[in-house]
Amino acid sequence: MQLELGNILVKDVQWGSRSEIRKGVVYVNRQELLDTLKDDRLARIDIDIVRPGDAVRICPVKDVLEPRVKVEGKGQVFPGFFGNAEMVGSGKTNVLKGMTVLTVGKIVGFQEGIIDMSGSGAEYTPFSRTINLVLLCDQADGLPQHEHEEAVRMAGLKATRYISQLAANVTPDESVTFATKPLAQQMAEFSGLPKVAYVYMLQTQGLMHDTYLYGLDVKKILPTFLYPTEVMDGAVISGNCVSACDKNTTYHHMNNPVIADLLARHGQDLNFIGVVATNENVTLLDKERSSNFTAKLVESLGVEGVIISEEGFGNPDADLIMNCRKIEALGIKTILITDEYAGRDGASQSLADGNPLANAVVSGGNANAVIELPPMPKVIGYIDAVEIIAGGFDGALKKDGSITVEIQAITGATNELGFNRMGALEF
């Protein structure tokens, strides 16, 4: 497969009488977009624009998406949600780089997040550096939680689709091409280089802990093979409410840095064979089944090494270690990417499970670390949620509007794809 991403560098997002892109500025007809998002399940939808450095707090955040549109080739971005589930990952896709569509509203589950556009909290989230079109969505009275989540998720997808279509005929500022060959050819290429695969663990524990692949709830699948460019075309969609710090938003999936880095080194010092997408399960039987199948798929690829990324923590730690242990038992080296819940003092056990074979681990940071967030003059959403979201607590919100929370409450703070700014200091 060959996919060309045409990046259109967004300079600003503004309201306009007509939705269009001119000289790098995205103009949005606010009423037209609102009309596109009408849904009887949502009692109110409001839209705002926030920019880096704004004194704005957004809470509770549900998902973040990046506008992308197919301009050449098969399928459409977000396959399985609009029309059909035709295979994607080839042709040309235009990307509005530097902006997002961000969904927020009354809390669905307890594991939603905070994004500050300035101040100390802004240092922990990548989305303080993007121009964000924020959708505030309130559910209709009596709407069940799972329908509330779906309604907000679809509002985000519809808005992103609406905005992305403005880029269909815009000449990109830069283009990057990614190419992979059919599996048999890829395995035979670069014979002198080590073959590497990526095991992509997706959050699928149910109860609004879901991820979608080509529109299908991933907890209903067995592990499967993907070309990396399929992920770039929106084949993987977030639909979960795990802790904000290590939730992979849809934006994270579309910009997965593990995939990007492996492709950048492909043909240089490794042969990137492809992606094995797998799920994270609740029961022991399901965990054993998926990890057995993942190991079988990895072995069939004939690789020497595997990178495994986790999503979430606690229960999924068992899936992570099962995948590691069974792949290592085949003589295939693994590197794990996770984060830690080591207590506020950093002295507790970092993962809920472990094994001596897990001897190469990259950490996204300790999610239990505490941070003080200053007051913000403008809040989009419902700030009282900080006292019940994961990382918050009763009394977290002070009378002056400042907040004391663990960084697990900040969207993307310890992301387990490595999509964050924290790192180790060497003295």
Image (spheres, rainbow, N blue to C red):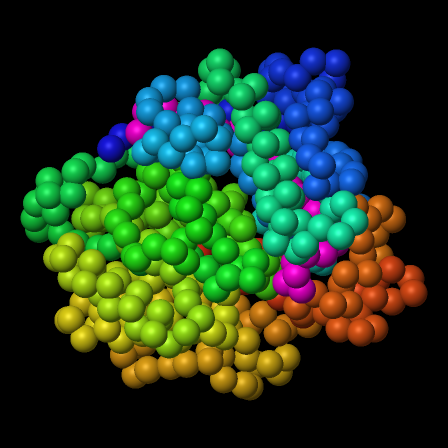
Residue displayed at 22% across by 55% down:
196
**Residue 224 placement (x, y as % from top left):** 28, 52
Segment tinted magenta in the rendering: 90-119
Is 192 situated left or right of 117 in this image? left
160 on left or right of 195: right
Residue 386 locus on image (x, y percent): 76, 63
**Direction right: furthest residue:** 399
Q: Taking 123 as reference, is 183 left or right?
A: left
Q: Is residue 97 magenta?
A: yes
Above-or-below relation of 48 to 124: above
Give the vertical position of 30 relative to 341 (above or below).
above
> Residue at coordinates 62% horizontally, 16% vertically from top-left?
20
Q: Residue furthest front?
A: 142
The residue that appears at 33% across and 25% down in the rendered structure is: 74
Q: Quadrant of residue 366?
A: bottom right
Q: Residue 99: x percent and y percent?
A: 60, 34
For residue 30, above or below residue 294: above
In this rendering, does residue 57 appear at all? no
Camera-side residue of 350 and 221:
221
Determine the image quadrant of residue 10: top right
